[in-house]
């Protein structure tokens, strides 16, 4: 990557290594930042974090530490990908980053135009919904690691499917270069090349005024990331902070412990004493290292976490919502001090929606699947209608009667259902030579944004606004590119492809509602975050650790023999031993591939547990939905913790000990279930021959009678409660 004859610079500096994932990791980072700021001045210290998740919290902690040290709080904090983007832009201001929707279209065109035959397996795999996403993710990783077909042609056999995909990726990047685009996965590799060669003095300009660099989350810095640091800090003081036994993302593609990737650095321990930690600190240590603290007797009876186990996935989130209400009542915690962690980004929209249905505000704003967004569906119907007008050669401002046009009935029905007083004439009135202008006119004349704002909560509106902007961006892109025809056929094809292949993980962002809200995020984003309570959802054995690793594109049996696959597929016994301390006897491992990635899944649980400063909840369910469906075993790690005599795992019940119920949905269900509950209590005691005191029941029902007389009670709810009493009493009602 460097110019011929110029070796890649060696990474030199200091690594502050934490023994295992600690809850005070940000305080350890702050100690190093203050030392560097006092030496070089706060404005001259650049803080680079490997991943963008948690940047705001990191900035707050560093600013607070600066104030306590008597300095002006001006931390300069950036995520590595964004810093690399600035390097690229400084080197070539004219280059454009390829957006996700544009990437989908270009890859599709490259594969469709392939002159060589598509391998039969991939041809069949194209029929699956996840094919495009799986291929896209694979090619992103290929690009990040700078795998090319020419580099892999070294005499080794390459699987035909990988050979085809690598060739397509080379063609894809040739098209990008020809059009002046760069995709996100190529930003760091390109930036490394620019810094190492100091092309046009870009390194000198980038490091002007920077005397020290503090690299955070060093355990996740890959080979190219470390080269980036080395090129950036060639004559600048470098301090890295990393956690042992904490790498999940780097170890996916590169085996080895923290020491393995820091051989050229001076390693020292943090100056901060290890904290006593939260009640579940021994659980964090066990998940990360396989061992409890040395003071085994001291922790006996003290190590404590909570367990939520329900019948269905929906019930899991509802019980989580109940417990959130209970925590706020008992501890006066705000919503933004709590987090619900899901195993993958695709699970965020569903979980957030269920929590909000249960009355819990959420702070996560995400762009949901375009296929389920009503505003997108409306705009897509407009696009289809404009296609019809274009095909029938209806001129702008044409006097052609709309009833003479062969409209798609489904399109017209959808628009009529969405827009009051809709008529096909409105479609002609909005027409313009520019497709994006036509859509903008529709949005304005039908008051689409106003209807969105009036139709629900502000967080729903925010998401739909973002979706509308994405559709408009696609329309603008179609008009300025030669990838697709700049007409309604081109827009329709690109929007349809984007809807089909949309991936939630590309667009998810975190924000805060005006009144605060519970964060919902993937567990991987908790590596350097802290919350009072963490709810880890879906702790089923099929997820932690799971059985399908790396990708669903190829069978696991194939992956084991795919040496060219851009991930760890054939780890050695030595690599297993070096990477995971949780393995007691690597020599006896039967399936090294499965064992390696099972241990990575265990680490994900460790990182999620580390984020909780007070309470850790391990949540799971038996079935996805009600009915006779496949059951899910609880995660083996939760089962081992429950079996340990040193750990106390307390089950969370649907109601608190004092009988309180939290959340609107849970409260409604509780009220409607009261008649049946009392009936069952009486029947149960009577069947056992025990005396039944109806005074308590009478008093309880009297309270409900007063509730029914309340003028503020929803009439529908009042009728529902009365109906339940009549059913419980055995009355027949139609």
Image (spheres, helix red, strand yellow):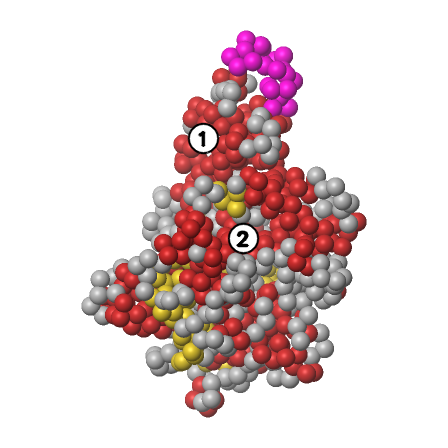
Q: Quadrant of the N terminus?
A: bottom right
Residue 280, how many percent across, how many down? 45, 76
Q: How far separated are the C-alphas under marks 2 and 1? A: 35 Å
Using the image, determine if residue 285 lies above or below residue 70.
below
Q: Secondary structure at mark 2?
A: helix
User: Is residue 407 part of the magenta span, yes or no?
Assistant: yes
User: Is residue 400 part of the magenta span, yes or no?
Assistant: yes
Q: Nearer the viewer, residue 727 or 603?
A: 603
Q: Which residue is mark 1?
A: 448
101 left or right of 28 in image = right
**Residue found at x 47% / y 75%:** 264
**Residue found at x 52% / y 26%:** 435
Answer yes or no: is residue 489 visible: yes
Give the residue furthest to the right: 120
Using the image, determine if residue 528 lies above or below residue 457.
below
Q: Which residues are magenta?
A: 387-409
Q: Which residue is mark 2?
A: 185
**Residue found at x 52% / y 70%:** 247
Residue 35, how many percent across, how many down? 29, 72
Would you say the magenta stretch is mainly helix, strand or loop? loop
Q: Mark 1 or mark 2, which is nearer the start of the sequence? A: 2
Give the residue furthest to the front: 5
Q: Quadrant of the C terminus?
A: top right
Residue 667, how many percent across, how many down? 45, 55
């Amino acid at each position: 990557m460097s110019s011929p004859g110029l070796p890649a610079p060696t990474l030199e500096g200091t690594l502050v290594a934490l023994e295992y994932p600690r809850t005070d990791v940000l305080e350890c980072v702050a100690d190093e930042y203050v030392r560097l700021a006092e030496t070089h001045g706060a404005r001259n210290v650049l803080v680079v974090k490997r991943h963008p998740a948690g940047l705001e919290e990191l900035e707050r902690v560093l600013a607070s530490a600066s104030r306590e040290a008597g300095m002006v709080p001006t931390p300069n904090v950036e995520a590595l990908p964004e810093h690399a983007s600035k390097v690229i832009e400084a080197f070539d201001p004219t280059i454009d980053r390829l957006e996700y929707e544009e990437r989908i279209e270009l890859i599709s065109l490259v594969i469709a135009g392939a002159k060589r035959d598509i391998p039969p397996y991939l041809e069949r795999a194209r029929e699956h919904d996840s094919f495009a996403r799986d291929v896209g993710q694979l090619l992103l990783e290929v690009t990040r690691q700078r795998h090319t077909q020419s580099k892999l042609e070294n005499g080794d056999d390459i699987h035909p499917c990988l050979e085809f995909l690598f060739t397509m990726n080379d063609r894809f990047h040739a098209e990008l270069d020809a059009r002046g685009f760069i995709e996100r996965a190529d930003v760091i590799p390109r930036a490394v090349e620019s810094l190492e060669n100091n092309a046009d003095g870009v390194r000198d300009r980038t490091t002007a005024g920077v005397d020290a660099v503090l690299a955070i989350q060093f355990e996740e810095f890959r080979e190219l990331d470390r080269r980036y640091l080395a090129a950036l800090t060639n004559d600048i003081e470098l301090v890295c902070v990393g956690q042992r036994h904490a790498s999940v993302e780097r170890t996916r593609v590169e085996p080895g412990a923290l020491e393995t990737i820091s051989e050229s650095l001076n390693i020292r321990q943090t100056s901060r004493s290890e904290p006593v930690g939260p009640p579940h600190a021994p659980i964090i240590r066990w998940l990360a290292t396989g061992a409890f603290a040395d003071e085994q007797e001291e922790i006996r009876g003290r190590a404590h976490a909570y367990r939520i186990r329900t019948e269905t996935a929906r019930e899991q989130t509802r019980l989580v919502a109940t417990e959130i209400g209970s925590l706020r009542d008992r501890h006066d915690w705000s919503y933004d001090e709590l987090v619900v962690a899901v195993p993958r980004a695709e699970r965020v929209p569903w979980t957030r929606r269920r929590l909000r249905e249960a009355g819990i505000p959420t702070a996560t704003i995400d762009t949901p699947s375009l296929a389920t967004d009503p505003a997108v569906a409306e705009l897509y119907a407009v696009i289809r209608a404009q296609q019809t007008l274009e095909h029938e050669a209806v001129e702008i401002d044409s006097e052609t009667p709309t009833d003479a046009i062969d409209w798609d009935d489904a399109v017209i029905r959808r628009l009529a259902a969405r827009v009051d007083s809709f008529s096909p004439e409105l479609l002609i009135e909005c027409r313009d030579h520019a497709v994006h202008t036509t859509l903008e006119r529709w949005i304005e004349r039908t008051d689409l944004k106003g209807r969105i704002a009036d139709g629900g909560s502000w967080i729903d509106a925010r998401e739909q606004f973002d979706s509308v902007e994405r559709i408009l961006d696609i329309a603008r892109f179609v008009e300025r590119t030669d990838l697709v025809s700049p007409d309604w056929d081109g827009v329709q094809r690109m929007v349809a492809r984007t809807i089909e292949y949309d991936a939630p993980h590309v667009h998810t962002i975190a924000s805060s509602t005006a009144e605060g809200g519970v964060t919902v995020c993937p567990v991987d984003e908790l590596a350097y975050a802290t919350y009072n309570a963490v709810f880890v959802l879906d702790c089923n054995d099929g997820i932690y650790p799971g059985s399908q690793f790396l990708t669903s594109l190829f069978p696991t049996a194939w992956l084991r023999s795919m040496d060219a696959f851009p991930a760890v597929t054939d780890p050695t016994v030595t690599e297993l031993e070096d990477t995971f301390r949780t393995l007691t006897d690597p020599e006896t491992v039967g399936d090294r591939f499965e064992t390696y990635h099972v241990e990575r899944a265990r680490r994900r649980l460790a990182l999620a547990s580390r984020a909780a400063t007070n309470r850790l909840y391990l949540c799971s369910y038996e079935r996805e939905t009600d009915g006779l469906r496949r059951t899910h075993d609880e995660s083996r790690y939760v089962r081992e913790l429950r079996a340990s005599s040193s750990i106390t795992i307390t089950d969370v019940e649907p109601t608190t000990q004092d009988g309180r119920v939290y959340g609107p949905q849970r409260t409604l269900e509780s009220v409607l279930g009261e008649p049946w509950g009392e009936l069952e209590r009486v029947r149960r005691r009577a069947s056992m021959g025990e005396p039944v005191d109806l005074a308590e029941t009478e008093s309880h029902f009297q309270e409900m009678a007063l509730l029914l007389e309340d003028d503020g009670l929803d009439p529908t709810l009042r009728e529902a409660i009365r109906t339940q009493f009549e059913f419980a009493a055995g009355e027949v009602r139609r």
